[in-house]
Image (spheres, helix red, strand yellow):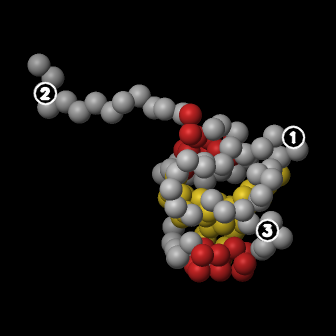
Amino acid sequence: MIRPATGLRVYLCREPVDMRKQIDGLALLVQEAMELNPFEEAVFVFGNRQRDKVKLLFWERNGFVVWYKRLERERFKWPDRLKGDTVSLSGQELNWLLDGYDLSVMQPHKALNFQSVG
């Protein structure tokens, strides 16, 4: 399976999107509704109202690529506790979302900042 790199910027549109939209419609949503540049080095993620379909849009050197996934039984766990219509995710979080993890309950270890070892 093809997956985006974990270091890539990811922008998730929290509002449901009509999955009949193709490249031009999704790029226009990025530009006008999300107020972002669809040509930047990033992945833009869209989901439908039932949360069983997802489309990813990204610009690859000389053209747009759309990646589409439809679940047969489960639902994607869309982030709902975050503020704003557009949510930034890491590439790793996007892969977790695509695998069915609920990002809102995943808690990493606390970051530690030390000044010396002795």
Residue at 80% from the left image edge and 66% from the top image edge: 19
Residue 21 lies, in percent from the top left, at 78, 73
Mark 1: which secondary structure? loop
User: Which one is in front, 6 or 53?
Assistant: 53
- Give the structural element (helix, strand or loop) at label 2: loop
Q: Residues within 10 Å of mark 3 (few under 14, many from 20)?
A: few
Mark 1: which amino acid?
A: Arg
Q: What amino acid is found at the position of numbered circle 2 in the picture?
A: Ser
Q: Residues within 10 Å of mark 2 (few under 14, many from 20)?
A: few
Frontmost residue, 66 versus 111: 111
Q: Which residue position is annotated with label 3?
A: 18
The mark lying in front, picked from 2 and 3, is 3
Does residue 87 appear to the left or right of 72 in the view shown?
left
Q: Position of residue 26 (x, y in %)?
A: 69, 73
Can you identify the residue that label 1 sits on?
73
Note whether 75 is above or below 15 in the view shown: above
Tally of marks:
3
**Mark 2 = which residue?**
116
Query: Residue 10 appears at what percent x and percent y?
Result: 54, 58
Q: Nearer the viewer, residue 66 or 70?
A: 70
- Distance, label 2 to label 1, CA atoms, is 51 Å
Give the residue displayed 58% in from the left and 40% down from the top: 103
